[in-house]
Image (spheres, coloured by chain):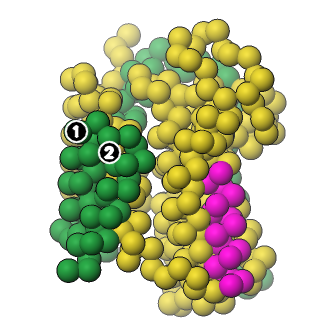
Amino acid sequence: MSAIWATVLLVGVISVAVRGAGPVVLGGREPPARLVGAIELLAPALLTALIVVQVFGGDRRLELDERALGLAAAVLAVTLRAPVIAVVIAAAVVTALARQL
Amino acid sequence: MNGSSVSADPADPCAPATYRDGVRAGLPLALVVGIFGVSWGVLAGDAGLSVPEALLMSSTTFGASAQFAAVSILANGGGVAAAVVAAVLLNARYGPLALSVAPVIRGNAAWRLLQSHMVIDESWALANRGGGRFDPRLLVGAGVVMYAAWVGGTAAGILAGDLIGDPARFGLDAAFPALFVALLAPQLRKRRPVAAAVLGGTIALALVPFARAGVPIMVASAACLLGLRKR
Protein backbone atom coordinates (compact mmCIF):
# COMPACT_ATOMS: atom_id res chain seq x y z
CA MET A 1 0.00 0.00 0.00
CA SER A 2 1.31 3.44 -0.85
CA ALA A 3 2.12 5.96 1.88
CA ILE A 4 -0.75 8.12 0.68
CA TRP A 5 -3.35 5.34 0.86
CA ALA A 6 -2.11 4.25 4.28
CA THR A 7 -2.36 7.80 5.61
CA VAL A 8 -5.78 8.43 4.08
CA LEU A 9 -7.22 5.19 5.46
CA LEU A 10 -5.69 5.41 8.94
CA VAL A 11 -6.57 9.06 9.52
CA GLY A 12 -10.06 8.51 8.09
CA VAL A 13 -10.86 5.48 10.23
CA ILE A 14 -9.50 7.14 13.39
CA SER A 15 -11.43 10.37 12.67
CA VAL A 16 -14.71 8.49 12.23
CA ALA A 17 -14.05 6.59 15.46
CA VAL A 18 -13.07 9.72 17.44
CA ARG A 19 -16.28 11.49 16.41
CA GLY A 20 -18.50 8.45 16.72
CA ALA A 21 -17.35 7.04 20.07
CA GLY A 22 -19.39 9.30 22.37
CA PRO A 23 -22.63 9.45 20.39
CA VAL A 24 -22.60 5.72 19.46
CA VAL A 25 -21.88 4.50 23.01
CA LEU A 26 -23.80 7.11 24.99
CA GLY A 27 -26.16 8.56 22.39
CA GLY A 28 -29.48 9.78 23.76
CA ARG A 29 -28.53 9.24 27.40
CA GLU A 30 -28.32 12.06 29.87
CA PRO A 31 -24.75 12.62 31.05
CA PRO A 32 -23.91 11.91 34.69
CA ALA A 33 -24.93 14.85 36.90
CA ARG A 34 -21.33 15.55 37.90
CA LEU A 35 -20.39 16.12 34.25
CA VAL A 36 -23.22 18.50 33.37
CA GLY A 37 -21.39 21.51 34.77
CA ALA A 38 -18.25 20.59 32.86
CA ILE A 39 -20.15 20.21 29.57
CA GLU A 40 -21.63 23.68 30.16
CA LEU A 41 -18.14 25.14 30.34
CA LEU A 42 -16.72 23.24 27.35
CA ALA A 43 -18.05 25.79 24.84
CA PRO A 44 -16.53 28.91 26.42
CA ALA A 45 -13.21 27.14 27.11
CA LEU A 46 -12.91 25.60 23.66
CA LEU A 47 -14.20 28.57 21.65
CA THR A 48 -11.68 30.84 23.36
CA ALA A 49 -8.88 28.34 22.73
CA LEU A 50 -9.84 28.10 19.04
CA ILE A 51 -9.93 31.89 18.74
CA VAL A 52 -6.52 32.54 20.29
CA VAL A 53 -4.81 29.66 18.45
CA GLN A 54 -6.29 30.64 15.08
CA VAL A 55 -5.45 34.32 15.58
CA PHE A 56 -2.12 34.27 17.44
CA GLY A 57 -0.80 30.77 16.69
CA GLY A 58 2.09 30.15 14.33
CA ASP A 59 4.41 27.23 13.78
CA ARG A 60 5.34 26.58 17.42
CA ARG A 61 5.34 30.28 18.21
CA LEU A 62 2.95 33.11 18.86
CA GLU A 63 2.50 35.68 16.12
CA LEU A 64 0.98 39.13 16.04
CA ASP A 65 -0.15 39.95 12.51
CA GLU A 66 -3.14 41.12 10.46
CA ARG A 67 -5.35 38.42 11.97
CA ALA A 68 -5.30 40.36 15.25
CA LEU A 69 -6.86 43.36 13.48
CA GLY A 70 -9.55 41.03 12.13
CA LEU A 71 -10.19 39.81 15.65
CA ALA A 72 -10.45 43.40 16.89
CA ALA A 73 -12.98 44.12 14.14
CA ALA A 74 -14.99 41.06 15.17
CA VAL A 75 -15.00 42.10 18.82
CA LEU A 76 -16.07 45.62 17.86
CA ALA A 77 -18.87 44.29 15.63
CA VAL A 78 -20.11 42.02 18.42
CA THR A 79 -20.06 44.97 20.83
CA LEU A 80 -22.21 46.90 18.35
CA ARG A 81 -24.63 43.93 18.29
CA ALA A 82 -24.01 43.19 14.63
CA PRO A 83 -25.47 39.91 13.32
CA VAL A 84 -23.12 36.92 13.15
CA ILE A 85 -22.56 37.11 9.42
CA ALA A 86 -21.66 40.81 9.65
CA VAL A 87 -19.13 39.98 12.38
CA VAL A 88 -17.52 37.39 10.10
CA ILE A 89 -17.44 39.69 7.07
CA ALA A 90 -16.02 42.59 9.11
CA ALA A 91 -13.15 40.41 10.34
CA ALA A 92 -12.36 39.08 6.87
CA VAL A 93 -12.50 42.51 5.20
CA VAL A 94 -10.31 44.18 7.83
CA THR A 95 -7.76 41.33 7.69
CA ALA A 96 -7.68 41.40 3.88
CA LEU A 97 -7.31 45.20 3.76
CA ALA A 98 -4.55 45.15 6.37
CA ARG A 99 -2.65 42.62 4.23
CA GLN A 100 -2.87 44.96 1.24
CA LEU A 101 -1.09 47.74 3.13
CA MET B 1 -33.36 15.82 4.58
CA ASN B 2 -36.31 18.02 5.39
CA GLY B 3 -36.85 18.17 9.11
CA SER B 4 -39.41 20.94 9.20
CA SER B 5 -42.16 18.44 9.97
CA VAL B 6 -40.23 16.82 12.81
CA SER B 7 -42.09 17.42 16.04
CA ALA B 8 -40.50 19.50 18.74
CA ASP B 9 -38.76 18.00 21.71
CA PRO B 10 -41.11 18.92 24.55
CA ALA B 11 -38.23 18.92 27.02
CA ASP B 12 -36.55 21.75 25.14
CA PRO B 13 -37.70 25.12 26.41
CA CYS B 14 -36.19 26.91 23.40
CA ALA B 15 -38.04 27.18 20.13
CA PRO B 16 -37.27 23.90 18.36
CA ALA B 17 -34.95 24.14 15.39
CA THR B 18 -35.39 22.28 12.13
CA TYR B 19 -32.76 20.85 9.82
CA ARG B 20 -33.59 23.75 7.55
CA ASP B 21 -32.66 26.20 10.32
CA GLY B 22 -29.32 24.41 10.58
CA VAL B 23 -28.76 24.61 6.82
CA ARG B 24 -29.59 28.31 6.86
CA ALA B 25 -27.25 28.98 9.79
CA GLY B 26 -24.46 26.99 8.18
CA LEU B 27 -24.72 28.24 4.61
CA PRO B 28 -22.67 31.49 4.79
CA LEU B 29 -19.82 29.75 6.58
CA ALA B 30 -20.08 26.78 4.22
CA LEU B 31 -19.02 29.13 1.45
CA VAL B 32 -15.79 29.83 3.32
CA VAL B 33 -15.37 26.12 4.10
CA GLY B 34 -15.76 25.40 0.38
CA ILE B 35 -13.03 27.89 -0.54
CA PHE B 36 -10.65 26.22 1.92
CA GLY B 37 -11.75 22.90 0.43
CA VAL B 38 -10.62 24.09 -3.00
CA SER B 39 -7.24 25.13 -1.64
CA TRP B 40 -6.82 21.77 0.10
CA GLY B 41 -7.78 19.98 -3.12
CA VAL B 42 -5.09 21.92 -4.98
CA LEU B 43 -2.50 21.06 -2.32
CA ALA B 44 -3.55 17.40 -2.36
CA GLY B 45 -3.15 17.24 -6.14
CA ASP B 46 0.28 18.84 -5.93
CA ALA B 47 1.25 16.34 -3.21
CA GLY B 48 0.38 13.43 -5.52
CA LEU B 49 -3.00 12.35 -4.14
CA SER B 50 -5.34 10.84 -6.72
CA VAL B 51 -8.90 12.13 -6.98
CA PRO B 52 -10.36 9.14 -5.08
CA GLU B 53 -7.72 9.48 -2.35
CA ALA B 54 -8.42 13.18 -1.89
CA LEU B 55 -12.20 12.69 -1.86
CA LEU B 56 -11.96 9.76 0.56
CA MET B 57 -9.79 11.80 2.90
CA SER B 58 -12.12 14.82 2.85
CA SER B 59 -15.21 12.69 3.38
CA THR B 60 -13.79 10.61 6.25
CA THR B 61 -11.33 12.95 7.99
CA PHE B 62 -13.45 16.10 7.47
CA GLY B 63 -10.97 18.34 9.21
CA ALA B 64 -9.16 21.11 7.37
CA SER B 65 -6.22 21.54 9.73
CA ALA B 66 -5.69 17.77 10.02
CA GLN B 67 -5.77 17.31 6.24
CA PHE B 68 -3.47 20.25 5.47
CA ALA B 69 -0.99 18.94 8.05
CA ALA B 70 -1.05 15.33 6.85
CA VAL B 71 -0.60 16.19 3.18
CA SER B 72 2.14 18.76 3.86
CA ILE B 73 4.06 16.18 5.88
CA LEU B 74 3.71 13.52 3.15
CA ALA B 75 4.74 16.00 0.45
CA ASN B 76 7.86 16.88 2.44
CA GLY B 77 8.80 13.22 2.87
CA GLY B 78 7.80 13.05 6.52
CA GLY B 79 6.39 9.53 6.34
CA VAL B 80 3.09 7.88 7.21
CA ALA B 81 3.55 7.77 10.99
CA ALA B 82 4.33 11.48 11.28
CA ALA B 83 1.43 12.42 8.98
CA VAL B 84 -1.05 10.23 10.85
CA VAL B 85 0.04 11.42 14.30
CA ALA B 86 -0.18 15.09 13.27
CA ALA B 87 -3.62 14.67 11.72
CA VAL B 88 -5.03 12.64 14.59
CA LEU B 89 -3.81 15.21 17.15
CA LEU B 90 -5.55 17.93 15.16
CA ASN B 91 -8.81 15.99 14.96
CA ALA B 92 -8.67 14.75 18.56
CA ARG B 93 -10.78 17.65 19.83
CA TYR B 94 -13.76 16.21 17.97
CA GLY B 95 -13.86 13.51 20.65
CA PRO B 96 -14.93 15.86 23.46
CA LEU B 97 -17.07 17.92 21.06
CA ALA B 98 -19.00 14.84 19.94
CA LEU B 99 -19.25 13.67 23.53
CA SER B 100 -20.83 16.96 24.56
CA VAL B 101 -23.59 16.56 21.96
CA ALA B 102 -24.09 12.82 22.62
CA PRO B 103 -27.12 13.30 24.91
CA VAL B 104 -29.14 14.79 22.04
CA ILE B 105 -27.89 12.41 19.35
CA ARG B 106 -30.67 9.85 19.14
CA GLY B 107 -31.73 7.02 16.85
CA ASN B 108 -30.07 3.71 16.06
CA ALA B 109 -26.30 3.26 16.19
CA ALA B 110 -25.72 3.80 12.45
CA TRP B 111 -27.75 7.03 12.45
CA ARG B 112 -25.92 8.21 15.57
CA LEU B 113 -22.59 7.52 13.86
CA LEU B 114 -23.68 9.48 10.78
CA GLN B 115 -24.86 12.42 12.88
CA SER B 116 -21.62 12.40 14.88
CA HIS B 117 -19.69 12.72 11.62
CA MET B 118 -21.23 16.16 11.08
CA VAL B 119 -19.37 17.51 14.13
CA ILE B 120 -16.80 20.15 13.24
CA ASP B 121 -15.92 23.26 15.22
CA GLU B 122 -18.33 25.44 13.27
CA SER B 123 -21.39 23.15 13.23
CA TRP B 124 -20.89 22.36 16.92
CA ALA B 125 -20.58 26.05 17.80
CA LEU B 126 -23.74 26.92 15.81
CA ALA B 127 -25.67 24.10 17.51
CA ASN B 128 -24.68 25.27 20.98
CA ARG B 129 -27.57 26.96 22.75
CA GLY B 130 -25.65 27.84 25.89
CA GLY B 131 -25.75 26.18 29.27
CA GLY B 132 -24.35 22.95 27.80
CA ARG B 133 -27.41 22.33 25.62
CA PHE B 134 -27.15 21.50 21.93
CA ASP B 135 -29.66 21.24 19.14
CA PRO B 136 -29.08 18.13 17.02
CA ARG B 137 -30.96 19.52 14.00
CA LEU B 138 -28.85 22.65 13.94
CA LEU B 139 -25.76 20.46 14.23
CA VAL B 140 -26.74 18.14 11.40
CA GLY B 141 -28.23 20.83 9.15
CA ALA B 142 -25.19 23.09 9.45
CA GLY B 143 -22.82 20.11 9.36
CA VAL B 144 -24.28 18.73 6.14
CA VAL B 145 -23.85 21.95 4.15
CA MET B 146 -20.31 22.38 5.44
CA TYR B 147 -19.55 18.73 4.65
CA ALA B 148 -20.90 19.14 1.12
CA ALA B 149 -18.87 22.32 0.71
CA TRP B 150 -15.68 20.68 2.02
CA VAL B 151 -15.95 17.56 -0.16
CA GLY B 152 -17.22 19.55 -3.16
CA GLY B 153 -14.46 22.11 -2.73
CA THR B 154 -11.90 19.30 -2.60
CA ALA B 155 -13.22 17.89 -5.88
CA ALA B 156 -13.12 21.31 -7.54
CA GLY B 157 -9.61 21.99 -6.30
CA ILE B 158 -8.06 18.72 -7.41
CA LEU B 159 -9.93 18.53 -10.71
CA ALA B 160 -10.00 22.15 -11.83
CA GLY B 161 -6.94 23.51 -10.07
CA ASP B 162 -6.41 26.80 -8.38
CA LEU B 163 -9.63 28.68 -9.14
CA ILE B 164 -9.55 31.09 -6.27
CA GLY B 165 -6.06 31.59 -4.90
CA ASP B 166 -4.90 31.78 -1.33
CA PRO B 167 -7.92 32.18 1.00
CA ALA B 168 -5.74 34.31 3.29
CA ARG B 169 -5.62 36.99 0.60
CA PHE B 170 -9.32 37.57 1.24
CA GLY B 171 -8.88 37.47 5.02
CA LEU B 172 -10.85 34.23 5.12
CA ASP B 173 -8.54 32.75 7.76
CA ALA B 174 -10.02 35.40 10.08
CA ALA B 175 -13.59 34.29 9.33
CA PHE B 176 -13.71 31.27 11.66
CA PRO B 177 -12.29 32.97 14.78
CA ALA B 178 -14.75 35.82 14.12
CA LEU B 179 -17.63 33.33 14.05
CA PHE B 180 -16.40 31.90 17.35
CA VAL B 181 -16.22 35.40 18.88
CA ALA B 182 -19.84 36.03 17.87
CA LEU B 183 -20.98 32.71 19.33
CA LEU B 184 -18.86 33.02 22.48
CA ALA B 185 -19.98 36.54 23.48
CA PRO B 186 -23.53 35.67 24.62
CA GLN B 187 -22.11 32.96 26.90
CA LEU B 188 -19.94 35.34 28.90
CA ARG B 189 -22.65 36.80 31.11
CA LYS B 190 -21.86 34.66 34.14
CA ARG B 191 -18.74 34.27 36.20
CA ARG B 192 -18.02 30.58 35.61
CA PRO B 193 -18.11 30.64 31.79
CA VAL B 194 -15.84 33.69 31.88
CA ALA B 195 -13.41 31.82 34.14
CA ALA B 196 -13.48 28.81 31.79
CA ALA B 197 -12.89 31.05 28.77
CA VAL B 198 -9.94 32.83 30.38
CA LEU B 199 -8.41 29.55 31.54
CA GLY B 200 -8.95 27.83 28.19
CA GLY B 201 -7.47 30.74 26.25
CA THR B 202 -4.50 31.01 28.60
CA ILE B 203 -3.71 27.29 28.43
CA ALA B 204 -3.90 27.32 24.64
CA LEU B 205 -1.66 30.38 24.25
CA ALA B 206 0.86 29.06 26.76
CA LEU B 207 1.16 25.72 24.96
CA VAL B 208 1.43 26.96 21.37
CA PRO B 209 5.23 27.47 21.51
CA PHE B 210 5.89 24.10 23.15
CA ALA B 211 3.33 21.57 21.95
CA ARG B 212 2.50 20.04 18.60
CA ALA B 213 -0.39 21.54 16.65
CA GLY B 214 -3.71 20.33 18.03
CA VAL B 215 -2.42 19.71 21.55
CA PRO B 216 -2.98 23.27 22.86
CA ILE B 217 -6.69 23.20 21.97
CA MET B 218 -7.12 19.66 23.28
CA VAL B 219 -5.53 20.51 26.64
CA ALA B 220 -7.41 23.83 26.83
CA SER B 221 -10.71 21.96 26.63
CA ALA B 222 -9.83 20.54 30.06
CA ALA B 223 -10.61 24.00 31.44
CA CYS B 224 -14.24 22.88 31.40
CA LEU B 225 -13.41 20.63 34.37
CA LEU B 226 -13.84 23.79 36.46
CA GLY B 227 -17.52 22.92 36.19
CA LEU B 228 -17.26 19.41 37.67
CA ARG B 229 -19.80 19.16 40.48
CA LYS B 230 -18.92 17.80 43.86
CA ARG B 231 -20.94 14.89 45.07
Picture coordinates of residue B90, whole percent (x, y): 48, 60
Picture coordinates of residue B55, whole percent (x, y): 73, 71
Please tell me which residue is depicted at 52% across the width and 73% down the height of the picture.
B68
Q: Nearer the viewer, mark 1 or mark 2?
A: 1
Please tell me which residue is depicted at 36% across the width and 68% down the height of the picture.
B171
Colour chosen for chain B: yellow
Which residue bears the numbered disc 2?
Answer: B181
| Tag count | 2
Residue A6 relative to residue B175: left or right? right
The magenta segment: B145-160
Q: Is residue B119 magenta?
A: no
Residue B190 relative to residue A84: left or right? left
Please tell me which residue is depicted at 27% across the width and 41% down the height of the picture.
A78
Of the pair B32 and A32, the residue shown nearer to us = B32
Quarter that holds the N terminus of chain B: top right
- Callout 1 secondary element: helix
Q: Which chain is green?
A: A
Looking at the picture, which amino acid does disc 1 mark?
Answer: Thr
Question: In the drawing, what numbered circle is on residue A79?
Answer: 1
Of the pair B193 and B28, the residue shown nearer to us = B28
As measured in the structure, the alpha-carbon distance from the residue carrying label 1 to the one carrying label 2 is 10 Å
